């Protein structure tokens, strides 16, 4: 019980400090505009109204940076290849819970605005994910960032979900997820724990990739559960011809 109480209190204090410090740059920016003395009242009202978006953007950036740095400092992470009984409420589980709360707050206040931008990919890298070059994340539904690995030129579609954990029989199980180079995940798809997606592979929209699956390189998968629909010739880029239904053709 003491562990749970400490976890709740420490999480509340840390998130309160992060949130307060994140508001500060935007508040100072807003106050600076509010204290302008030139022009008539109507001009000041217009300028002050237009300052809302820059102030909120400053808040979002500060929230992402401070939250990620705080998680590193506190050591709150999702343990890799772990099985944590919920009833035990041990420290690895409580650290994971506080890490998850931090991610949820950032995606709630910043993710809805900055998703599908370089800043959103940068936040995932700062918060523990391995992110290659030219990675675009158009979703706020990625969890357990330190268990996510992205190659180069990866696109995660709108509202796709990937999480390094699942709950089975009262046990939280974790495993890494790897996205190879030139991988595309369609909108609202679900990627299970322990999944490896090969280079130049596409997962169609609304698909479900079950846990611990390995998707072949240069292939197109879709469905529930996801199955291979097409294969791309090794020498051909994805979507540029050379697609063989059912996985046939040269390998």
Image: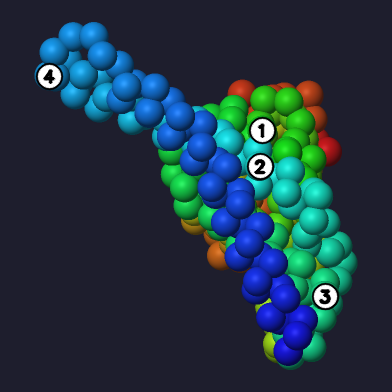
Label 1 or label 3, whichever comes before in sequence order: 3
Instruction: Determine which quarter of the picture holds residue 79.
Output: bottom right
Residue 21 horizontal side relative to residue 52, left or right: right
Q: CA distance from mark 4 to mark 1?
A: 39 Å
**Which label sits in the foreground, 1 or 3?**
3
Rate crowding at label 1 as few (under 14), some (14 to 19) or many (20 or more) other CA atoms within 10 Å.
some
Residue 42 horizontal side relative to residue 205, left or right: left
Residue 190 appears in the figure:
yes
Residue tagged 3: 91
Label 1 or label 2, whichever comes before in sequence order: 2
User: At numbered mark 4, what does the secondary structure look like: helix, strand or loop?
Assistant: helix
Q: CA distance from mark 4 to mark 2?
A: 36 Å
**Which label sits in the foreground, 1 or 2?**
2
Dots 1 and 3: beta carbons under 8 Å? Answer: no
Q: CA distance from mark 3 to mark 2?
A: 23 Å
Residue 147 x %, y %: 78, 54
Q: CA distance from mark 1 to mark 2?
A: 13 Å
Q: CA distance from mark 4 to mark 3?
A: 56 Å
Residue 122, numbered circle: 1
Q: CA distance from mark 1 to mark 3?
A: 28 Å
Could you say which is closer to the camera, residue 17 or residue 123?
17
Residue 58 x %, y %: 50, 30
**Which label sits in the foreground, 4 or 2?**
4
Q: Which residue does the image show at 77% across and 46% down from the upper left?
A: 128
Residue tagged 4: 42
Label 4 or label 3, whichever comes before in sequence order: 4
Dots 4 and 1: beta carbons under 8 Å? Answer: no
**Which label sits in the foreground, 3 or 2?**
2
Residue tagged 2: 66
Q: Which residue does the image show at 23% across and 9% down from the upper left?
A: 38
């Amino acid at each position: 019980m003491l562990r749970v109480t400490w976890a709740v209190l420490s999480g509340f204090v840390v998130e309160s400090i992060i949130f307060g410090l994140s508001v500060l740059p935007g508040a100072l920016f807003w106050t600076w505009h509010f204290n302008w003395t030139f022009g008539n009242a109507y001009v000041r009202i217009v300028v002050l109204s237009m300052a809302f978006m820059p102030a909120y953007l400053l808040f979002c950036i500060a929230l992402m940076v401070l939250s990620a740095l705080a998680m590193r400092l506190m050591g709150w992470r999702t343990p890799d290849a772990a099985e944590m009984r919920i009833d035990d409420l041990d420290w690895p589980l409580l650290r994971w819970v506080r890490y998850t709360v931090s991610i949820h707050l950032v995606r709630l206040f910043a993710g809805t605005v900055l998703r599908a931008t370089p800043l959103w990919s940068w936040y995932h890298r700062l918060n523990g994910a391995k992110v290659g070059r030219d990675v675009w994340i158009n979703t706020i539904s990625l969890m357990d960032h330190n268990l996510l690995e992205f190659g180069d030129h990866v696109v995660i579609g709108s509202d796709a979900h990937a999480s390094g954990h699942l709950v089975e029989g009262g046990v939280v199980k974790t495993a890494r997820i790897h996205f190879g180079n030139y991988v595309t995940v369609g909108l609202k798809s679900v990627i299970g724990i322990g999944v490896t997606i090969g280079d130049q592979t596409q997962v169609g929209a609304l698909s479900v990739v079950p846990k611990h699956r390995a998707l072949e390189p240069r292939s197109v998968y879709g469905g529930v559960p996801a199955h291979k629909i097409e294969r791309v010739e090794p020498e051909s880029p994805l979507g540029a011809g050379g697609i063989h239904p059912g996985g046939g053709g040269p390998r």
